Image (spheres, helix red, strand yellow):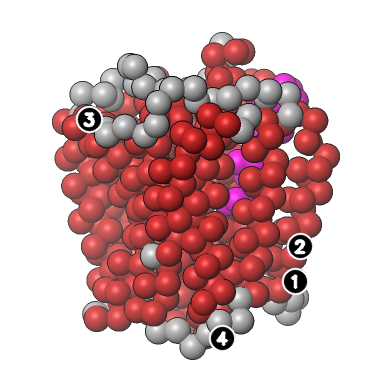
Amino acid sequence: MLLQNTYNFFKIKPVASLGFLFATSSLMIGVWAGALPFMKERMGLSDADLGLILLLAPLGSLTGVLLSTKVYRNIKVGTWLGVGNAVQALLFCVEVFAPNPWVFGIALFFRGGLGFLNGVATNAVAVRFEKQYDKKFLNTFHAIYSIGGALGAGLAALMFKFNLGSTSQVLSALAIILIGIALLKKNYVLHDYFIHSGSGFSMPTKSILGLSFICLVVFMAEGSVVDWSSIYLKRDILAPLSIISLGYGGFFVAMTLGRLNGDVLVPLIGEKRIVLLGTLLAALGLLLVSQSVEAYVVILGFVLTGAGCCFIVPVLFGSASNIPNVSQVQGFGMITSGGLIGFLAGPSIIGLISEQWSLSVGFMFVVFMLCLAAFVGGRSGLLK
């Protein structure tokens, strides 16, 4: 059943082409995560400095939220898909090559905004594909995102093994992305339509805010792994250089394996139970990370965090597209804005906590937030 669903996904060329875009940003994140400790050292940033600069990315995301309805009321989604993701990949390179914190921060701001807008576009088209082909694809799309992250982390680890540093890694990833987008462009321009035609951004209801909070916390957990796992393993755990990317890589492998089963398992288990059990498992994983001093036990904790988070985001994104009397762009904006803020602001908060106490205390903060998300998810009326 799993293999059949995956086969159906790749058999449909427009669907598989969209899957490539889901993989592009996470591929770059995987390489970026491995480069971050060296970027931090090169620019002479403390944990608090890095945390504050990273806050520019969620500011960019908030700008994207405010602009999203205007952008997608005037630009067809097929035009945006290739261009938006190509520019985002270039901005990752600017961050890695940044000569000073100013350039790094500006690139973070624009990447945050583009990341939000790209996420709206790809997920809106993914939901449209589910309706068009009457098949479940959303978990598989997010599995492809996870595969991209694991490949990025694996690429970084492999190239480090051969003494090829962050410059070679990020340029290799950029080449893969730009060539892929160029080859698949014909499948993107087929989406010759607007995904928003209503009014501008409106305030969410209390129920939607609950889902947005869960999304914020889950993305905060993901962001903490992306931005701090390599630093934690390298500096605090004193792990060998060749395995510092495996915390992030293991996290995304677990996400991938879960999501490849998600289109089958989520309907069986139920959305509410998925959110409740998933947030608690992720909390257990980060608890293990924060309390262990052994590198491979810490990596196992990151893996458990990925297993807990794997189903939650597709469930929330699916709910965002089915809110009554709300357009897809507005629905994604209301729920995923919380997620992107959590993904990008969460690591900044952890950096500030680390500066005052330690990174392990920062991970414990995320454990507390995941427990709160479990409580909110259990009481949500929008989850079946």
Residue 282's disc is none
The answer to whether mark 1 and mark 2 are in CB contact below 8 A is yes
Identify residue type, mark 2. Answer: Ser
**Measured from the top left, where is residue 371 in percent x and y?**
20, 48
For the stretch drawn in magenta, the main secondary structure is: helix
Between discs 4 and 2, the one toward the N terminus: 4
Q: Amino acid at mark 1?
A: Ser
Numbered label attached to residue 42: 4
- Nearest to the eye among marks 3 and 2: give it: 3
Q: Relative to residue 38, is residue 382 depicted above or below? A: above
Q: Which residue is at the far bottom?
A: 44
**Residue found 47% across the figure and 38% down from its top:** 68
Residue 35 image position (x, y, % from top left): 59, 72
**SS label for mark 1:** helix
The reply, left or right, for residue 232 in relation to residue 191 is: left
Residue at the image position 39 percent from the left and 79 percent from the top: 49
Q: Residue at x 78, y 57 (%)?
A: 175
Q: CA distance from mark 1 to mark 4?
A: 17 Å
Image coordinates of residue 213 in percent, x first then y, are 26, 43
Q: Which residue is mark 2?
A: 172
Nearer mark to the viewer, of 3 and 1: 3
Residue 170: name its quadrant: bottom right
Task: State the CA–CA distance, disc 1 to disc 2.
Answer: 6 Å
Q: Say whether marks 4 and 3 touch (CB < 8 Å).
A: no
Q: Secondary structure at mark 3?
A: loop
Q: Amino acid at mark 3?
A: Thr
Sequence-wise first label, 1 or 4: 4
Mark 1 or mark 3, which is nearer the start of the sequence?
1
Q: Which quadrant: the C terminus?
A: top left
Q: Mark 2: which secondary structure?
A: helix
